[in-house]
Amino acid sequence: MVPVLTPEERQKLRSTVLHRMQLQLEKTEKQIETIKKQTLAKLNLLQQPGPASASQQKELIRQVLEQEELRIE
């Protein structure tokens, strides 16, 4: 037999679930915002005038990889 919850117990359970969902939503929104900022930073690097030398190309690649590493952490 399934136990029956009182209206107060159901409301408390709903409130707890809604609160957890709200916290998860906020966390997800922050993660999305962080990814947006990182992506824009990468685009800005890539839109700079093309590197004239191999060392400049290596530096640009290093910067992009460094930002990607930060995102993964």
Image (spheres, rainbow, N blue to C red):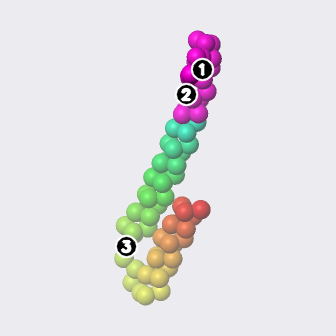
Identify the residue under disc 3. Answer: 49
SS under mark 3 = loop
Residue located 37% across and 73% down the image? 49
Q: Residue furthest top?
A: 7
Residue located 43% across and 57% down the image? 40
Mark 3 Cα shell of 10 Å, populated few (<14), some (14-19), many (≥20):
few
Determine if residue 26 is in view.
no
SS under mark 1 = loop
Horizontal and vertical percent position of residue 44: 42, 63
SS under mark 2 = helix
Q: Residue furthest bottom?
A: 54
56 relative position to 17: left or right: left
* Label 3 vs 1, first from the N-terminus: 1
Horizontal and vertical percent position of residue 43: 40, 63
Point out the image quarter for the N terminus: top right
Mark 2 Cα shell of 10 Å, populated few (<14), some (14-19), many (≥20):
few
* Label 1 vs 2, first from the N-terminus: 1
Vertically, is 28 above or below 6? below
Residue 3: image tag: 1
- Depth order, front residue of 36/23: 23
Task: Say which of marks 3 and 1 sits in front.
Answer: 1
Residue 45: image tag: none
Please tell me how many numbered marks the rendered image carries: 3
Determine if residue 59 is in view.
yes
Three-letter amino acid code of the residue under disc 1: Pro
Residue bounds of the magenta highlight = 1-22
How far is mark 2 from mark 3, CA to CA? Answer: 49 Å
Residue 18: image tag: 2
Point out the image quarter for the C terminus: bottom right
- Depth order, front residue of 15/66: 15
Task: Say which of marks 2 and 3 sits in front.
Answer: 2
